[in-house]
Amino acid sequence: MKKPNIIIFITHDQGHFLGCYNEFPNSLETPNLDKIAKNGIRFTNYFCTAPQCSPSRGSIQTSLYPHQNGLMGLVDRGWTLPQEFKTMPMYLKELGYSTHLIGLSHESRIPSSLGYDTMTERFFSKRGREINPLYNCKLVEKESKKFLEDHKNNEKPFYVSIGVEEVHRPFKIWADSVDPNSLKVPPFLPDNEIVRKELSEYYGAINRVDLTIERIISMLEDTGLNENTLFIYTTDHGSPFPRAKCTLYDPGIETILLMHQPNSDTFSNGKVINGLLSNIDLLPTLIDYIGGELPKNIEGKSFLPLLKQEQTELRSEIYVEKTYHEIYDPIRGIRTNNYKYIRNFENLDTLYQMPAPVLMAPSGKYMKNFYNYPRPTEELYDLRKDPLEKINVINTTEYQEIASDLRKRLFNWLKATNDPILKGKIPKQ
């Protein structure tokens, strides 16, 4: 049997903001993506390794943590994925795939080093750095249509990464806003006119992505490629709001993952996977699914046993980190089903950092005063009683055994993965 084609569609900053992720509830109307979830697989506890674009995407590419593959900051601030690390297109190419990039790439200053056979047109500065054109939904629709028409009769299976700028700020450049009075505000944000206005623009941009998904699925059906294509929808990290993006709280690290292949029992039938997973687990799962041997020098685990219902749990914890965004802000964390422990390695005057576009937005200006106090070295949250992570119980007597256990597990992970934070300040790349 021919190996399935693989398409990964990845957005910016979407977190769990999708109609079928209705734990808020969020009041989003995304019928096309919800249909993929209904017919395929939806993952409810799928987290990124880092709450920032480049580091998280680097983990998807390599199945390594940012401090292992060296991509600990943003590409547009001078970081890049070192060329000695194998990437998803490289692994899939070895397994007989042609590999292609449509739209955004944010893992390397030299995208050609990532292992794609073809890429949509790139533009470079005189110093050789990529200058991204506006890889929005409209542009990738056009490029996707051309690609699928050109490859509909291929003997060789293809892997395509489709990246869009949506739903990064500023939201209103992507689409019309929804009615602010029609939406429901997630509980980690205050419900006021300021937040509702920004959310209305954000929701409108997400709706525009949903329309693009409808068009791409129609293209797959029109070209006869749909039945033998595994379609994956995900995002890089949490939503671009205060107490989310750039933090290790759940709104910063929880991510969407939908997968569907019509002719595969593994990726169909509306399954919901609730087990803890990390985005380092996607690469080994794909390799496992298409019959490849799992690499020994990666951190991820194949979650195929969950999909085949051979197991109900794959991980007892996931690990998350942050090192650089606009500033040096090294944080490491461990999350289990019930608890989260965060270790802050630098003293800040605020509980958490907001990235500049969030801080300059009305919601950031409004909320910064609520968290304008020095943050502790350690944070511990009981996710069962305090899912919004507002009550730090690190010094509470009844939680000392849990704190000790999670602290030990986190530092064992730092040692096992050779995190340079253990040696002191990590220099800029």
Image: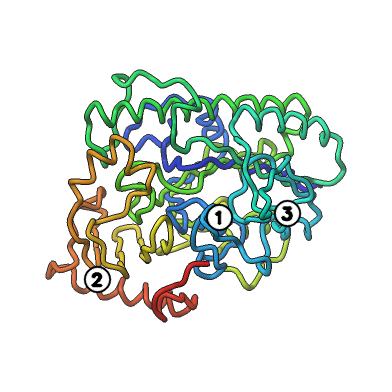
Residue 410 lies, in percent from the top left, at: 37, 72
- Tell me the SS state at disc 3: helix
* Residue under label 2: 403
> Sequence-wise, which precedes: disc 1 or disc 2?
1
> Sequence-wise, which precedes: disc 2 or disc 3?
3
At x 54%, y 63%, the residue is 71
- Mark 2 and mark 3: span between their CA atoms? 45 Å
Which amino acid type corresponds to the residue marked 2 in the rendered image? Ala
The answer to whether residue 78 is left or right of residue 369 is right
- Tell me the SS state at disc 2: helix
- Is 300 or 133 nearer to us in this picture? 133
Residue 318 in view in this figure: no
Within-10-Å neighbours for mark 1: few <14, some 14–19, many 20+: many
Residue 177 lies, in percent from the top left, at: 41, 21
The quadrant where residue 363 appears: top left
The answer to whether residue 183 is left or right of residue 399 is right
- Is 285 or 26 nearer to us in this picture? 26
- Is 206 or 33 nearer to us in this picture? 206
Closer to the eye: label 2 or 3: 3
- Tell me the SS state at disc 1: helix
- Image mark for residue 75: 1
Residue 66 lies, in percent from the top left, at: 51, 64
- Is 378 or 298 nearer to us in this picture? 378
* Residue under label 3: 112
The quadrant where residue 300 appears: bottom right
Which amino acid type corresponds to the residue marked 3 in the rendered image? Ser
The answer to whether residue 408 is left or right of residue 255 is left
At x 32%, y 20%, the residue is 182
User: Which residue is most to the front?
Assistant: 126
Closer to the eye: label 1 or 2: 1
Which amino acid type corresponds to the residue marked 1 in the rendered image? Val
